[in-house]
Image (spheres, coloured by chain):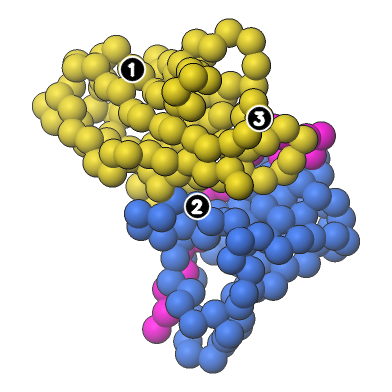
Amino acid sequence: DGGITQSPKYLFRKEGQNVTLSCEQNLNHDAMYWYRQDPGQGLRLIYYSQIVNDFQKGDIAEGYSVSREKKESFPLTVTSAQKNPTAFYLCASTPGQGQETQYFGPGTRLLVL
Amino acid sequence: AQSVTQPDIHITVSEGASLELRCNYSYGATPYLFWYVQSPGQGLQLLLKYFSGDTLVQGIKGFEAEFKRSQSSFNLRKPSVHWSDAAEYFCAVGPSNDYKLSFGAGTTVTVRA
């Protein structure tokens, strides 16, 4: 079945540690996105990528980094510079032909120890 | 800039009763509009979308939404709610030929027996 997978489901970060969240899609979509979800704030865009080897900052990119070396993969690193990383992180993708439906993965919950 | 307002943070409805969730958007041109549903700890699932044409849009799970340009609204409705409809609902708006969506803060729906 085609879809988006995110791993791990839960992730724990220690102070000063970088952690990486995985997002993989087998939909052959060009565009991929990372969102952060906090209670009562909806979804906020962290980074997005329209094509391999290219990505743009979203609304809250500080403290995060991404790479897009392969079409199917868009990992997100939460760096030690992100002082409030506890949130639910969602990855999404679209075919990339314009404004289209975004398909979401199941999410990763990041907690700080 | 585009934005979305969902005025109701939390709605409680009896099983079998009708449901209406409000969504107001701000955008200069004709927007692309979406409603998504999220069960606890899960990703987002598309309920329906409006791009153009008929302003009354039918979606999955018996939901429908009506685009009203004069009121900048895209309210979601369901005639008879089932207990499984308890979830969080997000309205989203995006401009044409752009990859970015703006999400509302969400409305949590509780269904009582």
Residue A29 location in percent, x, y?
78, 41
Q: Which residues are magenta?
A: A94-113
Mark 3, residue position: B29
In the rendering, which numbered label is found on residue B78? 1
| Residue positioned most to the right | A53
Q: Is residue B9 above or below residue B15?
A: below
How far apart marks 3 and 1 lie (CA) works out to 28 Å
Does A98 lie within the magenta span? yes
Does residue B14 show up? Answer: yes
Looking at the rendered image, the disc whose residue lies closer to the viewer, 3 or 1, is 3
Q: Residues within 10 Å of mark 1 (few under 14, many from 20)?
A: some
Q: Residue at x 54, y 91 (%)?
A: A16
Residue B48 location in percent, x, y?
52, 23
Q: Chain of mark 2?
A: A
Q: Do discs 2 and 3 belong to a common subunit?
A: no
Residue B40 location in percent, x, y?
35, 47
Q: Which chain is blue?
A: A
Q: Which chain is yellow?
A: B
Q: Chain of mark 1?
A: B
| Residue positioned most to the bottom | A16
> Disc 1 marks which amino acid?
Lys
Q: Earlier in the sequence, mark 3 or mark 1?
A: 3
Q: Residue at x 80, y 50 (%)?
A: A50
